[in-house]
Image (cartoon, rainbow, N blue to C red):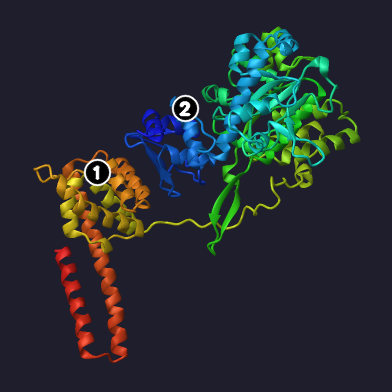
Amino acid sequence: MTGAEEVKNKLDIVEVIREYITLKPSGRNFQALCPFHNEKSPSFVISPDKQIWHCFGCGKGGDVFTFVMEKEGLTFSETLRLLALKAGVSLPEYSPELVGQKNRLLDAIEIAVTYYQHVLLESPQAEDARQYLAGRGLTEQVIDDWQIGYSPESWDDLINLLKSKGFNEKDIFEAGLSVQKAGGTSRYFNRFRGRIMFPIADINANVVGFTARVLPNKAGTDNMGKYVNSPQSKIFDKSKLLFALNRAKNSIREQDYVIIVEGQMDAITAHQFGFKNVIASSGTALTADQVRLLERFTDNLLFALDADAAGQLATDRASQNIVAGDIKIVEARDRFGRLNHYIDPTKSFKKNIKVALMPQGKDPDECIRRDRSGWIRALGEAKPLMQYYFDKILEPLNLDSADGKRQAAKSLLPLVSRLPNPVEKDFYVKRLASLIDIDPKFLYEAMPAPERSNPNEAPKDLPTATYVAKREEILSEHLLALICKFPLFINYLFDQVLPEHLVGEPSQAIYKSLILYYNQIAVNQDSGLGIFVLNYNDFKDWLLKNDFSSATKEFDKLIIIGERDFGEHSQAEADLEIKRIAKTLKRSYLNFRLKELTKLIAELESQKAGKTEMDEIMGEFNNLTQEIRKILD
C-alpha cells in the first residue's frame, strides 16, 4: 500500500472537508454551498460511502486529495504531506532529492524549530530567555506545547546544522533562516540571533516561519526592532497567516466566534487559561485573505486589544481591512464568453464585529493572568464595531456646537457608508441624525459612496452567464447513474440505447467506456448467475489504465447522482425508470435525426439531386418514422 492509499484509508473525507465548510446531511450523503463558486442553493455533495465529492454547479469533483489541493492551492506532494500529518501516517524518510521545493523549505523550518527549542531548554546561553519566559508565567509544558525556542548569538550554527542534514545555502536562504552578507559576497549568516523564537504555523499546523523577540535587557543593542519576522517566501506569507488559528479553529467553530488579540504572548496566555478560541493578528491589521480564512469557521469577530492608543489604532486598521474584504468576488463569463471577476453584493461576508476594551493600562496577557474576571467582563461588554466608533469619535466633541456636529458627521459618515447591510446602515444614519439634531435625508445626501476593496474590480451590474443543462443532458446522466447503481439492467441498456442517443460528450464518453469495460472485463467475471457486478474501484482503475482518466470525474459524479436521487429506489422502480428514460432519449434522438433528414431532403429537392441519393435518404427517413411509431405504441 502506498503512502497516499494509507492516508485515504485513515481519513474520512467528510471530517476533512468539514474543516473548511459547513455540511448538512442529505440522506446517506452530505451537501453544502460550494466553496469554489458563488451559489445560493447547495450543489456540493459528498458521498461518505465512496469517499468522493462533486459540485453540480461548477462541475468540480474528486477525492479528499483533490479537494484540499483545490482549496489550498497545493501540489499533490504538498497535499500528501499535509494529510499524512492529519492521518498520523509516517511518509518515507526525508530526502532532499525526492521532495518538492516547498517541502524542502518546510523540512528546514522543522529542523530549526527543534534546534531552537533544544537551545532554550538546555543551553547556558538561553538562561536569560528562560528567566524572562518564567517571569511571564510560561511553564515548561506551555513552552514545549508551543515549541518556543531561542536563537543563540551565533553567525552560522543553524546554517552548519542544516548543511549537515543535506540542505544547501539556497534552501536555507529561501526558508528565511539566513541572510546574505552585504557587499555582494556569497557568504550567508543566521537571520535570527539572540532572540526568543515563536514558531508561526499555517492553518494546517505546518510551521512556516518565526516571530523573533529580543530580550528586554538587549533591546536597542542592534538595528533590528523588538520583533523580527520571517521574510516573505514560498511558504511564509504574513498576510495569509494568523497566529494560533491552527489550534483555535475547532473551538472557534464550536463557540461560533473568534477573539482576536495583537501579540503572540496574548494568544498563548489565553489558551493556557482555557480560552481556546483566541488568535493573534501579530500587531497588524487583518487582511482580506485573513478574513477569508476566518470565514471558514465563524462570522463573529471580537477584537480584544490593548486599551492604549496603539491598541485602538490596531482596531481601526483591522476594521478597515475587514470592511474592504467584506465583498465576495465571484468568477463568471460575460455574454461574449470572457472570464471575468465580479463583485456580488448578495454574497458579502456580513461579519458581526465587536470590540472589547481591556481595563486601562492592561493588555490581554496581563488582564487574563491578574484579573480573569475583568477579562471575562470585558468580553461580555464588547461593543458592536460601529458603536465603538460612535463612542470613541463623539466622546471629545461638543455636540451642542456647529463645529462639533460638523466634525461628527465628517468622521462617522464615511464609516457608516461602508456598512454592507442597508438596515444597519439606516439605523446608524438615523442615530447620528438624532445625536446632532439634523434631518437624516441631509446625511444621506452628504454620505460618500463606499470604496471598493480593489478599484480594478468590475462594477456590480456587469452581466454574468450561467450554463443551464438541457433536459436530455440531465436525463442522460440520470440513466447512467441508475445503471451504475443497478448494473443488473446493463444488458437491457446496451440493447436499447446507442451512445449517440445520449446527450452530452461526458455522458457519451463514459457510456462508451462502460461498453468497452463490459466486453473486455465483465464477461470474464460472470458469477455463473448472469449478473454483472460493477465494482467502483475496479472500474476506476480500469479507466486509468486504459487512458480514460478524464472519465473518472464523470463516473464519480454519476455515483453521487445515483446515491442522491435514486438511493431509495427498489429494483422494480429502477427498472421502470431506466426504461422510461431510455425510451425518452431514443425518441428525442430519432425526432432530432428526422428533422435533420427533412432539411436534407428539402435541400436535395431544390438541387434536383439524383434518384439514387434521394431514395437512400428517403429510406432512412421511413425507417426512422417506423421506429418512432414503435416507441409511441
Instruction: State the image coordinates of residue 17 (x, y, percent, origin top left).
Output: 45, 34
Q: Residues within 10 Å of mark 1 (few under 14, many from 20)?
A: many
Q: Which residue is mark 2?
A: 86
Residue 429 screen position, x and y as percent:
73, 37
Q: Spatial distance from mark 2 to mark 1, Cα to Cα?
A: 32 Å
Q: Report x, y in % for residue 524.
A: 15, 48
Give the SS element for disc 1: helix
Which of the marked residues, 2 or 1, is nearer the chain's N terminus?
2
User: Which residue is nearer to you in this view: 65 or 208?
Assistant: 208
Type of amino acid under label 1: Lys
- Depth order, front residue of 171/441: 171
Which label belongs to residue 485?
1
| In-image side of 559 versus 407 (left or right) | left
Residue 87 appears in view: yes
Q: Tell me: residue 182, above or below residue 193.
A: below
**How far across and how far down the image is residue 140, in percent?**
62, 9
SS at mark 2?
Answer: helix
Residue placed at 23% from the left, 64% from the top?
Answer: 587
- Would you place residue 372 above or below residue 412 in this image? above
Q: Is residue 470 above or below residue 541?
A: below
Is 536 left, or right, of 337 in this rendering? left
Measuring 9% from the left and 43% from the top, which residue is drawn there?
529
Q: Nearer the viewer, residue 23 or 175?
A: 175
Quadrant of the rendering where the C terminus is positioned: bottom left
Quadrant of residue 502 in the image?
Answer: bottom left
> Which residue occupies the extreme front position in the image?
164
